[in-house]
Image (cartoon, rainbow, N blue to C red):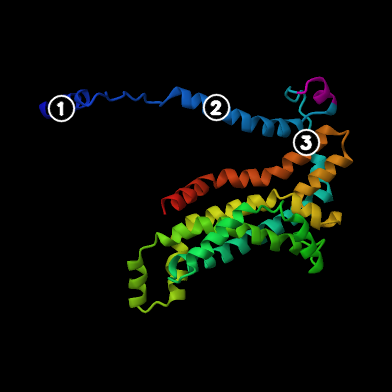
Amino acid sequence: MTSANIASRKATNKYTAKNGYRLSSKTPWGNPIVYFLSLILVAICVTPVLYIIFGGFRTNSQITNHPSGLPDPWVLDNYKSVFTSDVFWTELGNSTIVGIATMVGVVVLGIMVSFVIARYKFRYAPVMYALFSAGLMFPMTVGITPLYLLIRNLGLSNSLLGLILPQIAFGLPQTIIILVPFLQSIPDELEEACLLDGCSRLGFFWRMVIPLAMPGVATTGILTFVGSWNAYMLPLFVLSEESKYTLPLGVQMFSSEHSVDTAQVLAFTSLAMLPALICFTIFQKKIVGGLTGAVKG
């Protein structure tokens, strides 16, 4: 250690002693209490999921005799039965169509509305943003009865379009709240430079705004897809034919029909939640990065 470093450390120690505090020595692994609490929270969240997945590899007798035990022996018949079922693949296809269509609709409409609110200077922009923010205070469950009557009067009951359009409407507030800070953080000088180079307002939107807002777009798209995949209340009211069921509704109907076959119900449930779980796990960094950027903006 050089004399300059020694002098600097002595000066720092005198300063901290004078102001009544000491520099805390940080352990290389951080605070162990935080890690312990984090492990407890992870265990609380992961244990039910693992129980459902492992339960599909067991028989009903194993579950009855040892509810919290591991499969012994491992049984693949439950998952094979679900994979060979036409009902599962039909419901998987319906959920995929509804999820992707809802995601595309929410992202496309959300980024256009957010661009207008964030980049156009007019009197009612804060009012529009406040109205969309207020939309978060009215979940779909509150207005499910008038919403169902509206869907029925429009002739969209028992159709996938009757699920997609309301989910797009209820997904827009969250999307706009996340995207507006992203678009507001884009420097005005960048837009002025593009306009001086002959780029139109629409060209600036396509060439600059969308690429710069991709973290927020990815975040809102993933959250919308997962929310649509897990939706249960709206499909329960809108859909009446089994051929139009989505997976959450199909799980409930499958559980009712096979109430005595617990192992097969667990296998069906684990396969139904697996796509959303994989999607959320793969893109969790994008979700966290997008929300962090929205807060900073």
Q: Position of residue 205 (x, y in %)?
A: 46, 70
Residue contact at pointers 2 and 3, CB within 8 angstroms? no
Is 152 included in the stretch rendered in magenta? no
Q: What's the residue at 61%, 61% (across, down)?
A: 106
SS at mark 3 in the image: helix
Crowdedness near tag 1: few (<14), some (14–19) or many (≥20) residues, C-alpha within 10 Å? few
Q: Is residue 121 above or below residue 216?
A: below
Residue contact at pointers 2 and 1, CB within 8 angstroms? no
Q: Write down the residue under mark 2.
A: 39
Q: Which picture quadrant has residue 172?
A: bottom right
SS at mark 1 in the image: helix
Range covered by the magenta-colored residues: 61-67
Q: What residue type is disc 3 on?
A: Leu
Can you tell which mark lies on residue 11?
1
Q: Marks 2 and 3, Cα distance to the nearest angstrom? A: 25 Å
Q: What residue type is disc 2 on?
A: Leu
Q: Position of residue 193 (x, y in %)?
A: 33, 72
Q: What's the residue at 62%, 44% (across, down)?
A: 278
Q: Is residue 11 above or below residue 80?
A: above
Task: Give the main secondary structure, helix, strand or loop, of the magenta stretch.
Answer: helix
Q: Write down the residue under mark 3.
A: 266
Left-right relation of 54 to 239: left
Q: Earlier in the sequence, mark 2 or mark 3?
A: 2
Q: Earlier in the sequence, mark 2 or mark 1?
A: 1
The quarter in which the C terminus is drawn is bottom left
Pick the front one: 114 or 30: 114
